[in-house]
Image: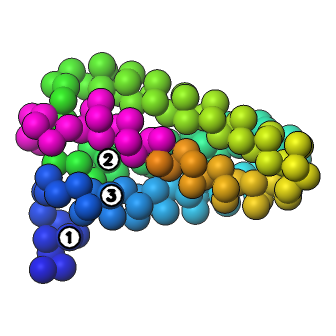
Amino acid sequence: MLNKYLNQPTGNILIQLLRYFVSGGVAFVVDFSLLYILTEFVGLHYRLSTVIAFTVGLLITYLFSILWVFDSRRFKNAKLEITIFAFIGVVGLLLTSFFMWFFTDKFNVHYMLSKVFTTIIVFLWNFIMKKLTLFPKNGRKN
């Protein structure tokens, strides 16, 4: 049974959500760590650190999505798929930048706690949009 959840392709949206949560968790740890390192040790402004860290997290999420999370893809054209994935990611980045600013500057929440709130919002946006546009249940099989 564990093999079904970990290794086998699945169209089950709950398993996909669980896998996306795991892959998002890995991406979040990298994103969160980079945000901290770039801000505290490299000396970048938290907004620039946010963009860099988010971009690395986006690449990790893409690889997990095509290799493990989703069992079907809508597009055969990899360039088109990556472009749409990146567009969703850019909107996610804009949402991330907005909510980081909103929580940190407007409500005086520490930027690391702001990142937690922001990640929850953007995680839901990303999963829903990717599932609907790139990896629908009736797409082509990998």
| Residue identifier under label 2 | 65
For residue 5, the mark is 1
Report the residue at 49% width, 62% height from top: 25
**Along the line of sight, which residue is nearer the eye, 80 or 102?**
102
Residue 92, located in which quarter of the rendered image?
Answer: top right
Q: Secondary structure at mark 1?
A: helix
| Residue identifier under label 3 | 17
Q: For the C terminus, which image quadrant? A: top left
Judged left or right of residue 127, residue 78 is left
Please state the extent of the stretch shown in magenta in the rendering.
125-142
Sequence-wise, the earlier of marks 1 and 3 is 1
**Along the line of sight, which residue is nearer the eye, 43 or 50?**
50
Q: Position of residue 36 (x, y in %)?
A: 76, 57
Report the residue at 80% width, 40% height from top: 101
Report the residue at 71% width, 36% height from top: 97
Judged left or right of residue 118, residue 68 is left
Judged left or right of residue 122, residue 111 is right
